[in-house]
Structure formats: C-alpha cells, structure tokens
Image: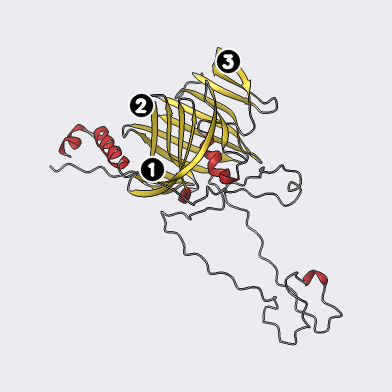
Amino acid sequence: MHVLLATGDSAWRWWQAASEDDAFELKPTDRRLKSQSLEADTHAQSESLPNGIFSIQIGRPPQRAPKKASPKPVPIAPAIPAELVTVTQAPELPSTSTPDETGAEQSAPTPPAEPPASPTQRPLVDTTFPRSVDINYVAFGVIEAEHRWRAEGKRYEITTRIKLEGRELRSQGEIGRYGLRPLLFRDGKDGNSQPTSQAEFNWPNKTVRLGEPDKQQELPLEEGAQDMFSAAYQFALLGDKLPSFNMQILSGRHSYQVPFTLKGEIELQLSNQRITTLLLTGTHQQRRFEFYLAPAWNNLPVRIKMADGDKVIDLKANQVRIDGQLVLNKPERPTRDR
C-alpha cells in the first residue's frame, strides 16, 4: 500500500481496478431485461404499427389533470346507464344510502405505496428514461473516459471522450417508434472537425457509408442497426421487447453481424457500491462485445468491454449522474500519513 501511495494516483487506480475484478462472479438469472418508456400507442398508431414496434417517451411523463368527482346519484333513475355497467359486476338497485360529502363514487381500495427510495438509490424500474446521463469510466484503472447521453425532443447524442488518447467517439440520431436510429457515428480526435473514420446512416435508402473520409464504402443497412455505443442504449430502452437480439453493429470502419445473448447477472464493485448488472454478450468472428446493464439505474451501461482479437478496451464506471442526480461517486483515495 505504501508503494502505491508513493507512486501516485495512476498506480492507486490500477490496484483498485485489479482488486475489484476478483469479486466478479457470473450467475444464472431469472431477471428480464425490462423495457423502459415504451408505451404502445392505443390510439391511431395501435393498429398501424408492426409487431415489435413501439413509441418512446423520454423524461417525465405528462401531468394528468385530476379526475373530477362524479355527480351525485339521482334518487329515482329510470334505468342504470349501460356505460356504468362493468363486465365483471351485475347491475345493482339504486342505493338508498346517503352519498359521502364529496359526492364522488366510491373507488376500489388503493394499493399501499412503495417506500420512497433514498436520495442516492433510484427506483428499481423507472417509468421513463433519463434525458441526461453522465458516466465517468476508467479503463484498466488508469485511462479515464467521459461518457455523456443527452436527449432533446426526438434527437439523441452520445459522446465518449478518452482523455489519454485525446479521442472522441460521437453517436447522433433519432428517437422514435423503432427506438434509436443512428444517423452519424464519428471516431476522431477531440476538438478536430475532421474524423479519422465515420459511419453515415441513410435509412430511406437502407444503406450506410463508412470508412475514412477519403476511403468510403457503401454497405447495406439492416433494420435495427446500431453503432458501437448506441447499441447499449437500444438494449437499455427496448429490453426484451426488441424483435431480435441479433443486431448489425457499425464502427467507423466495419460492419458486424452480432447475435447477442443475455448470459446472466453479475455483481460489480464500482467505487464504493456493489451493483447488480445483467450481462449481454455478442461475438462476430474475433470481435466481442460485452454490455453490463444496471437495472437499478435505468439499465445504463456501467461497464462496456470490447475486444478485437488480443486488443481489449474495458470501461468501468466510477461515477454516474442521472438527470443531475449523483448515484455513484468516485472513491476517495487514501491519504499518506505525514
């Protein structure tokens, strides 16, 4: 420990990451990867959407106006209106009892409310997906990456900046009935307007152009295709309501056909908390993708691991903010005695 303290912050982070890995154990699970903010439109769209297609609502659900109290019952009624008769209850004779002071009809008992979550503990399943997410990742305990999700209206943007390399990966696209639809994925140097590679999605023509700016190739684009980072959020949003876990994944240079599988659940020691995650894995030849999604935090990817042969990048969260709320804080480094 004294050696770690003497050699600085990088050595401390490396030691911490190595000690956390020892605690990981994959277990079978009966948990579902639950979808969020997916409400099949019961009006005009309900009969026109294909199976597996849903509308998405992000952010707080709209406030509904309080239901007005029903008028007092008429003492002598010629008949009970048909619309007040339910299919599970036979019509009753007009009641001679005195209505309550409000005059409202008596409703079924309300189930007891769930206990409120603590300030740093969000509900297990949120009804809507957050508009703002900030995750600080650490790779191998040394390399830091700032990861950000933003949603405005029907548009989203995901940025990941790897500080040591000065590298920025950016995904931009639309949010709609099919979940996320990437429009542009760029891989380049932070602050440089010219990317080293990119993927440009043309959904009307079902094609994607990818590669270096002067070496572009056009490939077929499959329905439900995602880029390397939007894929994790597509799983987080649609969950087990996805029509298929087989997905076309695009980087700035390559296209991969990846069948994903829910392998089980695994607890991760992230900073000062132990978090249960669901592990999704997918492979294409020597390429491997692993998404560790936290159900308690909107299925957010708290760990992303990608491998291409013997080249591995392993991003683990050590700080998470959801809509401005800090749910995971960086661990405090021990101070050296003077």
Q: Is residue 38 left or right of residue 193?
A: right
Query: In the rendered structure, are the residues bearing label 2 and label 1 in contact, judged by CB atoms less than 8 Å apart?
Result: no
Percent across and percent down for residue 126 are 53, 53
Which badge, 2 or 1, comes first in the chain's sequence? 2
Check the picture and name the quadrant holding the C terminus: top left
Which badge, 3 or 1, comes first in the chain's sequence? 3
Tell me, for residue 216, which label it has, or none.
Answer: 3
Q: Nearer the viewer, residue 201 or 48?
A: 48
Q: Nearer the viewer, residue 286 or 104?
A: 286
Label 2 belongs to which residue? Answer: 164
Percent across and percent down for residue 106 are 67, 76
Helix, strand or loop at label 2? It is loop
Residue at horizontal 70 percent and vertical 83 percent from the top: 99
Vertical position of residue 278 compared to residue 139: above or below = below
Check the picture and name the quadrant holding the N terminus: top left
Vertical position of residue 96 compared to residue 226: above or below = below
Vertical position of residue 55 compared to residue 109: above or below = above
Which badge, 2 or 3, comes first in the chain's sequence? 2
Helix, strand or loop at label 3? It is strand
Label 1 belongs to which residue? Answer: 319
Residue at horizontal 64 percent and vertical 50 percent from the top: 39
What amino acid type is highlighted by mark number 2? Leu
Q: Residues within 10 Å of mark 2 (few under 14, many from 20)?
A: few
Q: Nearer the viewer, mark 3 or mark 1?
A: 3
Helix, strand or loop at label 1? It is strand
Residue at horizontal 64 percent and vertical 32 percent from the top: 223
Q: Residues within 10 Å of mark 1 (few under 14, many from 20)?
A: many
What amino acid type is highlighted by mark number 3? Gln
Q: Image quarter for residue 12? A: top left
Q: Nearer the viewer, residue 207 or 172?
A: 207
Distance from disc 2 to disc 3, alpha carbons, whole Å, reads: 28 Å
Distance from disc 3 to disc 1, alpha carbons, whole Å, reads: 37 Å
